[in-house]
Amino acid sequence: MRNHLIKNVAIVNEGKISTADLLLKNGRIEKIGTGLQTAFAVEEINGEGLHLLPGVIDDQCHFREPGLTHKATIYTEARAAVAGGVTSFMEMPNTVPPAFTQQLLEEKYTIGANSSLANYSFYMGTSNDNADEALRTNEKKRDVCGIKIFMGSSTGNLLVDNYLTLDRLFRECEVLIATHCEDEKIIRRNLERLRQEGRELTAADHPIIRDENACFESSFTAIQFAKKHNSRLHVFHLTTEKEMTLFGNMLPLAEKRITAEVCVHHLHFTSDDYATLGNKIKCNPAIKAPHNREALWKALLDDRLDLIATDHAPHTLAEKQGSYEQAHAGLPLVQHSLRLMLHYVREGRISLEKVVEKMSHAVATCFRVKERGFIREGYFADLVLVDLNRPSQVSPESILYKCGWSPLEGFTFPATITHTFVNGHLVYGNGAFDESQWGQRLQFDY
């Protein structure tokens, strides 16, 4: 492994921006200081005019392997991730077959070990009838990010709507429980009501079918289970103003038992965008009316929402086209999430320090990720260099997702990712990849 010395760079870390040198040795941050010199060979990078951030940790991704590899693979999406400054990801269990057994889960880790340029972890899947197997995750809490419960519609047998199963999972699970919260009964009732109108449904109907009440009732239920059993609950991709009343900001993040997340597309798009993007922005939970986006931004900035993720969920263009009811739900986002948030830094909506907090520090704290998420001596060197004054555009040629498209196509970001280090390895630099080293399995401090 080459060692690197980044000189005179603006380091964004733990609420401050300061100029210093950074020495990377044997995969870790060896030294932070000024005027650093070494007695051993290093590859030097001039950091003047650049900002150095801890690598983004995306806690919610769908990389589609195994079984859905016509959409994406762990290799293709991790490659897109590191080009976007995402150095670690946590991936969902709704593959084919779903990760319903410990053996199937470990098979995904083997794929990651052999093909992921980013660091990786995979959630254990749950169903109405695999509680015994899911709870075996307690035995490997230092090696698995958590268990995932779909409390709303999903593919296959992943919907968990049996309250006895839910109660047992919340009561006995010792690892983090991550939930997708939408109430299935409300969704079905709304869908049937619209079908009875006798017209063809469109993408604009999506937030009416998957409305605020469906989200609120399910999130409320998850929180009640968590409070009953003092579970460690993390609620994924919140979308509504109403749900913001369920979360607080009085405790430090490390002391919270219930945490909340927002995704970049819910901070960026609103229901007004269905008119131009249609099924391309169909996702679950739905992108909703503008007042919800404003409430999400307010809650993000006052720390009721603890972290930012993507829910990266690629589908082929063919799967997104056609009728609304047939179009698949999900957006590819992992390559562009950091730059999208840097756009909002330029707009004055959020500070650079806050972006780093919500996309790196808070994720590491929330999930107890070991020795990552911060720029600290001794930590793994998962780092991103960005040029905040060099615009970059989302073009068909620049999109690295296997699905080959993005809902942000044509958008110009104010910034460019110039270098991405994963475990001290310069995996991406000035548009070129070095695929000589794979990422590592994330470890957790339990």
Image: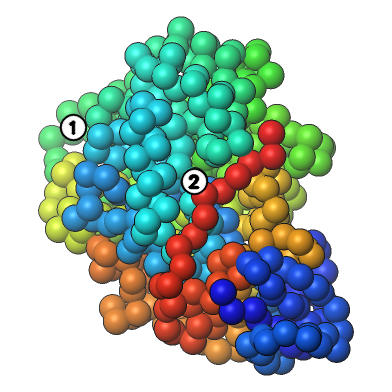
66 relative position to 363: left or right = left
What number is the disc on residue 195? 1
- Reply above or below: 149 against 240: above
Taking depth in this image into account, of 401 and 2 the one nearest to the observer is 2
Seen as rendered, the residue at the extreme right is: 34
Query: Residue at left 77%, top 40%?
Result: 254
- For marks 2 and 1, the one nearer the N-term is 2
> Which kind of residue does numbered mark 1 sit on?
Arg
Give the answer, above or below, for where 400 lies relative to 162.
below
Badge 2 local density, few (<14 within 10 Å), some, or many (20+)?
Answer: many
Q: Residue at x 43, y 14 (%)?
A: 132
Of 235 and 441, nearer the camera is: 441
Residue at the image position 57 percent from the left and 56 percent from the top: 57
The residue beneath circle 2 is 121
Out of 173 and 426, give the one closest to the viewer. Answer: 426
Q: How many marks?
A: 2
Q: Amino acid at mark 2?
A: Ser
- Residue 425 locus on image (x, y percent): 55, 72
Q: Quadrant of residue 423?
A: bottom right
- Give the x, y percent position of residue 305: 65, 45
Q: SS at mark 1? A: helix
In the rendered structure, the answer to whether residue 329 lies left or right of residue 93 reads: left
> In this rendering, does residue 306 appear at all?
no
Element type where label 2 sits in the image:
strand
Q: Residue at x 19, y 61 (%)?
A: 317
Specify the quadrant of the image occupied by residue 87. bottom right
x and y, in percent, of residue 232 in the image: 64, 28
Residue at mark 2 to residue at mark 1: CA–CA distance? 40 Å
| Position of the N terminus by quadrant | bottom right
